Amino acid sequence: MNIALLLEMAAEAAPDRVGLVCDGKRWTYAELLAAARGAFELIDQSGCEYVALLDESSEAAVIALFGAALAGVPYCPLNYRLADTDLAALLERVSPALVVGDEERVQRIAGEQGHTVYSRELFTLKAQESVPEAEDRVYDPGEGIAVQLFTSGTTAAPKAAILRHSNLLGYILGTVEFASADEADAALVVVPPYHIAGISALLSSIYANRRIVMLPSFEPDAWLKLVETEKVTNAFVVPTMMTRIIDKLENGLATDLTSLRAIAYGGGKMPLEVIQKALALFPDSGFTNAYGLTETSSTIALLGPDEHRDALASDDPKVRARLTSLGKPLPTVEIEIRDEDGKVLPAGEPGEIYVRGEQVSGEYKEKSALDAEGWFPTRDAGYMDEEGYLFLSGRADDVIVRGGENMSPGEIEDVLLTHPAVGDACATAIPSVEWGEAVGVAVVVRDGHEAPSEDELKELIRGRLRSSRVPEKVMFMKELPYNEMGKLLRREVKKILA
Amino acid sequence: MKPGTRLKSAACDTEVMVIRCGDGTIECGGAPMGEDKPADAAPLAADHSNGTLMGKRYVDADGNYELLCVKPGKGSLSVDGVALVTKDAKPLPASD
């Protein structure tokens, strides 16, 4: 089955209902489906092997996603924030592609790769004009790959995670009731299109017939204004966005947010004080914490609205602690905690989170990460309490997650070690109210050298990496802790820095 | 028959996508369903006329069959004469 079925059903049941609002333009389900079929023609004629998006969210993302699905070509939204060389390498891996978005940039960095490039406007216009001639055109049956997403590539070159039509449909059909939204309902979508949550938001809202209100890039004033003018009922934010929205509201911004019935969040660790403030500022909204991964087609566990309020109101520390939990597994997936030898652990014991279910792909273009029984090792560390609530304790591989952006300690350490006076270095996550996590570094000064200043080290990183990598905290140590196998004990450094 | 096949009712407007199936005959309104609509419509059997609902999933007791209704109609779904029932998805808060 093809994921385009979701849009076809919405267009069949409610052709004239508005399904998408973007930049002031409103699209009905019938218009979106017609444009997706037009995009099929463009894609089919181009002879491309991928449809890539190099752009912020817009109607073109919806049209490209479903057009690619109808044509049986994987849809591959790319992270436009990447540096030119990294982006060119990814474009090479999807060549030849029909690329929608930043035409000038694609020509400049990947002009020789044989891509067919359209600007957002031209692609949308052509898709609307290219209505297929035959009514009975044969579309792809949807037995292959629907979406390919590159992981952030923090530990090595980015991996190409593959989501099949069956994975995404398994997720949507198992968790969303068709046409269950009221005509007045609207979901505010602000996650970037290259994030799994950006894709699942489109699929689930369209299948529920819930109007999508797109905000191409997050800015708290614009977000609050859209909630008010579009009478948004549902919204998904990452913790950093929540912090910024709260700041605005605490500064006395007068906005009517009473339409906002449901607020979901995920994509990174939500600091306890932030969610407590949010619950107080939105007393009538239902909060949902969603936990999921690219490789699992989005959400696999969630903490629902009643559980949030119960935890907040409880005197029992165990119940109260659930405010920081990921909630319980969806009824459609199984979750286990296992130790390093793969043994299943009992409640309360920390280990690696494993998941199994129809929506779980666990597959990369190079190879599948599923074990023989279909379980996917998430590389996330956590535990489950006696009641089945899942708690995340960190990344199995120590990745720092700053405001939803994953960064590898290794790349920061490598830059620090280029300084002549730095003998050893360890980068680790430190708690940050604004970002969830930020970068902290511990540095050992080489014998016979003067210690460099904090600012000097920060400047060194700023000059070589993106500004998000610049440490908020720098600490000088006599030596770093290693175990007997010579492995750096990052957790110990983390404790000292925190 | 394989998953992903679209079946049409011979007796009404119903269309379904096959999510899971066995070797039995899938019927709607009392008549076998097919990938093409027959030229002459089959009569709608009175005891198979409860109707289908768009977007509902229909399953048998043993879990061998699962059909997704993609176009509603007046007939009801059955396999070898045994009526299928709707599979109720557990309502979840929207998480994305």
Image (spheres, coloured by chain):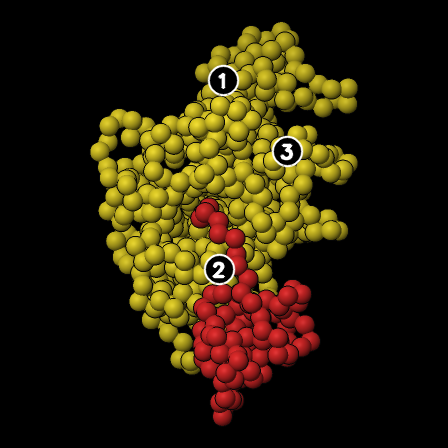
Residue B81 at what x, y percent from top left?
Answer: 62, 79
In which image quadrant can residue A207 be found?
bottom left
- Mark 1 lies on a secondary structure that is strand
Q: Quadrant of the C terminus of chain A?
A: top right
Identified at 74% across, 22% down, the residue is A486
Labelled disc at residue A386 = 3
Chain that bears disc 2: A
> CB of mark 1 within 8 Å of CB of mark 3?
no
Tint of chain B: red
Judging by the rendered image, the residue that carries numbered circle 2 is A51
Tint of chain A: yellow
In the image, is A259 to the left or to the right of B26? left
Going from the N terminus, do you reach mark 2 or mark 1 first?
A: 2
Chain that bears disc 3: A
Residue A456 at what x, y percent from top left?
Answer: 47, 16
Foreground: A54 or A182? A182
Location of residue A7 with respect to A496 vertically, above or below: below
> CB of mark 3 within 8 Å of CB of mark 2?
no
Going from the N terminus, do you reach mark 3 or mark 2 first?
A: 2
At label 2, which amino acid type do we have? Val
Chain that bears disc 1: A
- Mark 2 lies on a secondary structure that is strand
Identified at 59% across, 9% down, the residue is A449
Judging by the rendered image, the residue that carries numbered circle 1 is A473
Residue A323 at what x, y percent from top left?
Answer: 49, 31
Could you tell me how far apart the alpha carbons at marks 2 and 1 are, in whole angstroms? 42 Å
Q: Residue furthest front?
A: B47
